[in-house]
Amino acid sequence: MEKVDEFLEYIKVSVLDKSIVDTSLILSDRDGFVLGKIIDKSSSADNVIDNSLISTFSSATDQASKLHAGNNKSIVSFFDDRIIVHINVSNVILSIITDTESNVGLILGSQDDLIRSLTNLSNSIQSDNQDM
């Protein structure tokens, strides 16, 4: 779990642009089990995100991938009071919850770096699970 928290802190500080404020990060598996999270103090993300929302994303991304346009990597959801970006890599999902004033283009512009980092973390998690 410590490895996941370090990863999320790295994502928040290094990969996401400093101008994206009020951002919470939740890392989970495809079934919605939360592996780690960093909730911004001014955010109500902890109350909004639950396991069903994350696991629903998993189903939605599988369906979107059937549109014959390649594998779906991310889905952006716009709500009245927040934006949620889900990024899917292998067996992990990174949910980025931010306010409506955030620049989604900056988040999606960081997607390749996020995917590269998520791939390394996903491989590490799979390796840890096999060692058990």
Image: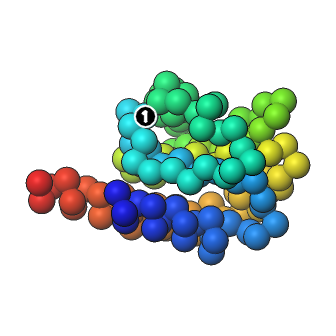
Residue 20: percent from left, percent from top: 78, 61
At label 1, the amino acid type is Gly
> In front here: 23 or 113?
23
Residue 95 place in picture, x, y as percent: 58, 46
**Residue 112 seen in the figure:** no
| Residue drawn at point x = 77 percent, y = 38 percent | 82
Q: Quadrant of the N terminus?
A: bottom left
Q: Quadrant of residue 79?
A: top right
Q: Of all residues shown, which one is farthest toward the bottom?
A: 14
Q: Residues within 10 Å of mark 1 (few under 14, many from 20)?
A: some
The front one of 65 and 131 is 131
Q: In the figure, 125 relative to 79: above or below?
A: below
Camera sees residue 132: yes
- Position of 107 with respect to 68 (left or right) is right
The residue located at (76%, 70%) in the rendering is: 18
Question: 12 and 90: which one is in front?
Answer: 12
Q: Is residue 84 above or below residue 117?
A: above
Q: Residue at x 75, y 48 (%)?
A: 42
Q: Nearer the viewer, residue 26 or 70?
A: 26
Which residue bears the numbered disc 1? 32
